[in-house]
Amino acid sequence: MDFSTREAPLRKLLRIIRSEAALRLALGEGVLALEKAGGWKSLGYSTLENYARERLGRSGRWISDARALARRINFSSDFLPLRDAVLWGRLSISKVEIVWKLLSGLTQQPVAQVVEAARFLTVKQLRSLARYLEGKPEQPNAEDSGRTWETLVRHIDPVDLMAFEYVVKLITGVSNLPTGDVSRAQAVEYMLAEAMTTLMRFSKVDLPSLAPRAPDNSSDSDSPSPTFDPQQKLDLRPSDEPDPDPGLETDIVWTADLDQIDAQLQSLSSALATRDLDIGILGRECCAMKVHIDAGYDNFDDYCKDVLQYPPASMASRVALVGRLNRLKPIEDALVDGRIGYEAASLIARISHPQNPDDAQNWVERAEHLTLKQLREEVDTARLFSRINDEAPHPPTRTEMREAADFERTVYSTLIGRTIPEPTPEPPPRAEDQGSRKSGGEASTENLPLRLSLPTDLAVFWRELETEHRTHVGGDFIPFLIRSVLSTWQDAFSHLSKIEYSDVYERDRWRCQNPCCTNRNVTPHHIIFRSAGGGEDRSNLVSLCATCHLELVHGKTARGSTLHVSGQAPDDLEWTHGKADQPLAEDSQAAPHQ
């Protein structure tokens, strides 16, 4: 393959990455305009994060970062050259953050001059320049820490497996962690820390020395990352820079009309989803052509950071999504047509079976009818029963949804009511009993595999702690792990059983029942207001967070009441929101199920 054949997709990829930066900035500016016009609460959403997920199909963290970017660039009219450079595709997001830092006190050079120079410097050179001006030594990038992951497998009793999954879910929910392997690993790390504390009561070993250790980067000490040399002559080659490709045809003028701003934000989000797919397609093509080898890079990740100026993790997720969508045509079509958002497509693409088109179509239909919060709950349930039954995940039935909800209620009931027996020392198991252990040993006929994707250092910590438990306590390690967490948390949760309406909160799993809200600071809402004759029957009570209850339902937004609920709790509720008073979504358990 000649160079010209390689160059075409590469230059196109560079242009699309720059245009994506323009869209991200425009979305951030749109969110700022939305705040001024009355905010997301006036549209029926309790938080910006919930609005972003349900209305724009983007994660809360992503939209918060976009808003922060817009605030920085629009902080002063002096930064207009920086804003123009982003909107016209001359700077990537990775460079903008560093340039803004340079312009915020590290240099007195004119903004336009710094922006123009940044076009021809790599991200690494810009970062070195910033550290040089700060007078700080060069530090290795966190992305280059070399942390590796591995899969840890243990065969355990099905009840223990379900309990483990819900304790992980409890920790991630209370700690407000995002879903995925990283947050799951964080929850496991917390569980191991609690187990280590409990185990210290039965062991004289210096257990804290077993704590996860940071990866050893000593092998890199002889080859430190290059520092910025102010005398260095940089080879600035304008011909290597792709032709500017504006992300927006025209600069958007944001009005004070809330509905118009909302429509514009949705349109931008749809355009951004198309850009994300294009980046995945072209990134996959460039990686397959090994363009990084031609440029002198050992791996595509470093090439992404230095040349494409795009986070390697973001590139990897988009390339992986495109790879899945190539085998899941119904999901790809739904995303391209705008019937589902980017987050929903990513969520169901990770769980759909490529060899079963009906499975993907079923998930698409659910994504079209459910809110993202409800869809995520169905995906979590599908994964749970997939692990328990040791089979490929499938869209959950209504019965499975209810069983999962009942078991989650049991976890909360345990925390606020029933006493957890303290882990007590048991004699170490005899050698002839080792083969019959249910946790950490060979799989028996009734045991199921628990598979955990963990950083290698955390997996080592698990094994070392497991060995200490076997030596000093005995018995099954994973039930001990679960009891350690629940017994620690029980003191903090036990007072909840004495709170008025605690039975309603427990029924609703201590969650705001608004299908678009993920908050947990619940309060009791009377579906038929007490002023209208509504009583204390539990069918007339539903758990809502303080924002949904006091501001959205009781009319403390710029538009008055923007959230309404009718029917009977818990399974026959209809939700409407916003000025148009349109149905919010179907109840997750009333959605199409087998």
Image (cartoon, rainbow, N blue to C red):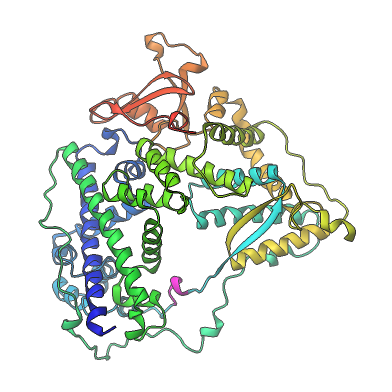
Quadrant of the rendered structure where residue 296 is?
A: bottom left
Inspect the magenta stretch and tell me whether residue 142 lies in it: yes
Quadrant of the rendered structure where residue 502 is?
A: top right
Inspect the magenta stretch and tell me whether residue 301 lies in it: no
Single out the residue that lies furthest toward the top: 533
Horizontal and vertical percent position of residue 350: 45, 53
Q: What stretch is highlighted in magenta?
A: 140-144
Task: Out of 502 and 50, give the one closest to the viewer.
Answer: 50
Horizontal and vertical percent position of residue 457: 61, 68
295 to the left or right of 355? left
Q: Across the whole image, how many numbered discs are drawn on residues?
A: 0
Q: Main secondary structure of the magenta part?
A: helix
- Is residue 459 placed above or below 121 in the rendered structure? above
- Is residue 220 placed above or below 62 in the rendered structure? below
- Is residue 518 placed above or below 84 in the rendered structure? above
Quadrant of the rendered structure where residue 434 is?
A: bottom right
Q: Residue at x 45, y 45 (%)?
A: 359
Horizontal and vertical percent position of residue 403: 59, 33
Task: Out of 82 and 25, give the one closest to the viewer.
Answer: 25
429 to the left or right of 159? right
106 to the left or right of 510? left
Q: Does the rendering let one see residue 577?
A: yes
285 to the left or right of 455? left
Q: Does the rendering let one see residue 174?
A: no
Q: Residue at x 42, y 43 (%)?
A: 363
Location of the N terminus (image quadrant): bottom left
Horizontal and vertical percent position of residue 318: 36, 61
Q: Residue at x 46, y 16 (%)?
A: 540
